[in-house]
Amino acid sequence: MTHNPLPYALLSLSAALFVAGCSNSPAGLSGTDDAGIEASMDGGYTDFFSSPYEAADGAVYAGDLRNGDGADDNGAGDLDAAEGRATLPVAWGRQPSGPRHRRVDTFYPDRNHAESAITSWLEGRLYVDRSDDGVRNPGVKPFADLWHRTARFVRAGDGEDQWRLTALTPGRISLQERDRQSVFIHSVRIWVGDELALELDDPNAFLDFPADLPFAAPGQRIRVEAAVGNRNQEWRPAQWAYLHLQGAHERDAGVDQPPFERRYRMADDGTHGDRVAEDGIYTLALNVPGDTPLARILVDVIAAQTLMTEFGDDYNSVAWGIPFRLEE
Ligand SMILES: [Ca+2]
Ligand SMILES: [Ca+2]
């Protein structure tokens, strides 16, 4: 396998932890169960470990959903960019491609507990259509992302190869070539009704599962604020922010449904619940859709430059995936 410096660093750290754990608690070795851990990830917890779905749009969307009710706000505005002023394409979207590699490094502090660092290497194509000609004829840009999450498990029963999820970090998506990434997420806050349900300023922070996850009933109002930025200020705005509602599990047993994915553009213009225009805090307020397998909220930041042209090797994006609980 060929990997970049970042995954090497992550894996080296995990390996060091693993060695330290073994030497400190030799009994831990007899409790290792890598196959059982991965079986649990791919079993009941697939919503949090199906990284390709967390990463991708899976379609080239026309316009943008903005009002939270599913109506098309036609986000593509005037395509003639004024000096330094970024505009949106008519349509854009991502499609994963090629094989996906997942690496799981698990440390066992004792025979009943496990902490797994999961890294996936994701590649795909970004489609951008900037010609307002009534034809869906996008150009294509390649991308290569890293997806990372850490999760803690407890053995569900003695002698069973079953592990119960007890905590997890947000899913963090970044460029494989980290020094090419100029966009960043500083923090995310989620309100459910009038209550601040989650405040995240560290994507490596653990959320207790399921107690710490934002929780809402279908139809309930949620509001998401994301403080984001771009070290490259060539365009104004320098980036766009999107919110994806996602879920992978099957809502109805026995019915094989495609993963649920809905993308909304977040506002930084003082509308749609945004408190201050152009302060780098993007907002979206919407009513939680019912009858969907909503399990994740993904905050997705993409550099303005990346959507200003249809071709080129300038993909520049970052995302945090936040697990979410929908009242059944
Ligand atoms: Ca077109
Ligand atoms: Ca704002």
Image: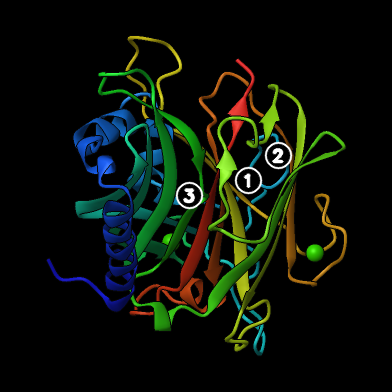
Q: Is residue 84 above or below residue 18?
A: below
Residue lying farthest to the left in this orientation: 1
Image location (x, y in percent) of residue 322? 56, 45
Q: Is residue 206 visible?
A: yes
Residue behind mark 1: 65
Q: Which quadrant holds the C terminus?
A: top right
Q: Is residue 25 above or below residue 127?
A: above
Task: Name the disc covering residue 68, or none.
Answer: 2
Q: Measure the C-alpha gap from mark 1 to mark 2.
A: 7 Å
Q: Residues within 10 Å of mark 2 (few under 14, many from 20)?
A: many
Q: Is residue 310 above or below residue 67?
A: below
Q: Which quadrant holds the N terminus?
A: bottom left
Q: Amino acid at mark 1?
A: Leu
Q: Amino acid at mark 3?
A: Tyr
* Towards the viewer: 129 or 132: 129
Q: How is the image coloured?
A: rainbow
70 with respect to 155 (left or right): right
Image location (x, y in percent) of residue 72? 63, 43
Q: Secondary structure at mark 3?
A: strand
Give the mark, 3 or 2, whose residue is nearer the N terminus: 3
Residue behind mark 3: 61
Q: Amino acid at mark 2?
A: Gly
Image location (x, y in percent) of residue 63? 57, 53
Mark in front: 3 vs 2: 2
Q: Residue at x 31, y 23 (%)?
A: 162
Q: Secondary structure at mark 2?
A: loop
- Cβ of mark 3 under 8 Å from ligand 1: the answer is no
267 with respect to 265 (left or right): right
* Towards the viewer: 16 or 238: 16
